[in-house]
């Protein structure tokens, strides 16, 4: 008889649980029960700095590809100076002047895979970016009438190599500028 009571009590509890489940509201939980991140979490300066520096680095590449595609079409200094500082700015302008004097231009695009290697927040803040530059789809093309369209790529230079860049935050007004670009053509990637 005792086993019968336990069995009966167990069945009543199970039935109550089933009724409770079937009568549960089908609406989602109230917003107050949704877990949200603590409002005391503040992103570290590194979390804000790295994306800004990467964005400027990407803009620099977009503009530099446009300049290499048409080195004689305009004075590129003002546009590039919004994204670059010396020594990178002067070095790149020298490369453009060389392209214009050949005369030649670049066709195609570079493929890149930039990643932030380090962030230093000491003034001036500096972000070092490692990139794998793939120039397989980019070619130097002659603009001379006799050789128009001829590829002038240097066969001895690798088409994929490591590139290191330093992006620095300049004061007054605060802005990020690509200051150093170091190609490591001896380091394939």
Image: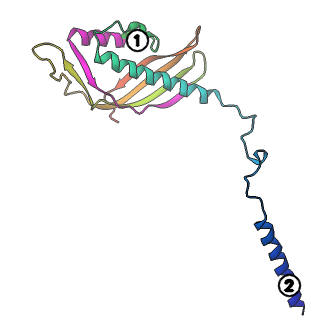
**Of residues 173 and 5, which is closer to you in this image?**
5
Picture coordinates of residue 142, whole percent (x, y): 18, 17
Picture coordinates of residue 89, whole percent (x, y): 40, 11
Q: Residue at x 53, y 29 (%)?
A: 118
Picture coordinates of residue 144, whole percent (x, y): 15, 13
In the picture shown, does residue 50 fall above or below 76? below
Q: Residue at x 83, y 85 (%)?
A: 7
Write down the quadrant of residue 49 in the picture. top right
Task: Say what secondary structure mark 2 lies in.
Answer: helix
Indicate the quadrant containing the C terminus: top left, top right, bottom left or bottom right: top left
Question: Which residue is identified by label 2?
Answer: 8
Label for residue 89? Answer: 1
Coloring basis for residues: rainbow
Q: Which residues are magenta?
A: 91-119
Q: Are marks 1 and 2 in contact (CB under 8 Å)?
A: no
Q: Earlier in the sequence, mark 1 or mark 2?
A: 2
Task: Judge left or right: residue 127 versus residue 72.
Answer: right
**Of residues 39 and 163, which is closer to you in this image?**
39
Q: Residues within 10 Å of mark 1 (few under 14, many from 20)?
A: many
Q: Residue at x 20, y 11 (%)?
A: 103
Can residue 87 be seen from the camera position used here? Answer: no
Task: Judge left or right: residue 62 versus residue 124.
Answer: left
Task: Judge left or right: residue 20 versus residue 184.
Answer: right
Picture coordinates of residue 3, whole percent (x, y): 86, 90
Disc 1 versus disc 2: nearer the observer: 2
In the picture shown, does residue 38 fall above or below 151? below
In this rendering, the count of numbered labels is 2
Indicate the quadrant containing the N terminus: top left, top right, bottom left or bottom right: bottom right
Can residue 44 be seen from the camera position used here? Answer: yes
Task: Say what secondary structure mark 1 lies in.
Answer: helix
Indicate whether residue 92 is drawn in magenta: yes
């Amino acid at each position: 008889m005792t086993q019968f009571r336990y069995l009966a009590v167990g069945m009543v509890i199970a039935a109550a649980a089933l009724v409770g489940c079937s009568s549960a509201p089908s609406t989602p939980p109230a917003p107050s029960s949704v877990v949200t991140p603590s409002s005391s979490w503040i992103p570290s300066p590194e979390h804000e700095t790295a994306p800004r520096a990467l964005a400027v680095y990407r803009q620099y590449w977009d503009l530099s590809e446009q300049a290499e595609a048409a080195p004689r079409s305009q004075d590129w200094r003002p546009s590039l100076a919004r994204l670059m500082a010396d020594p990178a700015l002067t070095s790149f302008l020298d490369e453009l002047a060389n392209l214009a004097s050949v005369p030649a231009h670049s066709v195609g695009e570079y493929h890149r895979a930039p990643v932030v290697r380090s962030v230093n927040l000491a003034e001036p803040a500096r972000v070092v970016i490692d990139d794998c530059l793939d120039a397989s789809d980019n070619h130097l093309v002659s603009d001379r009438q006799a050789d128009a369209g001829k590829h002038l790529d240097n066969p001895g230079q690798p088409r994929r190599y490591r590139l290191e860049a330093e992006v620095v935050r300049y004061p007054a007004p605060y802005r990020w500028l690509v200051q150093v670009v170091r190609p490591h053509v001896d380091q394939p990637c």
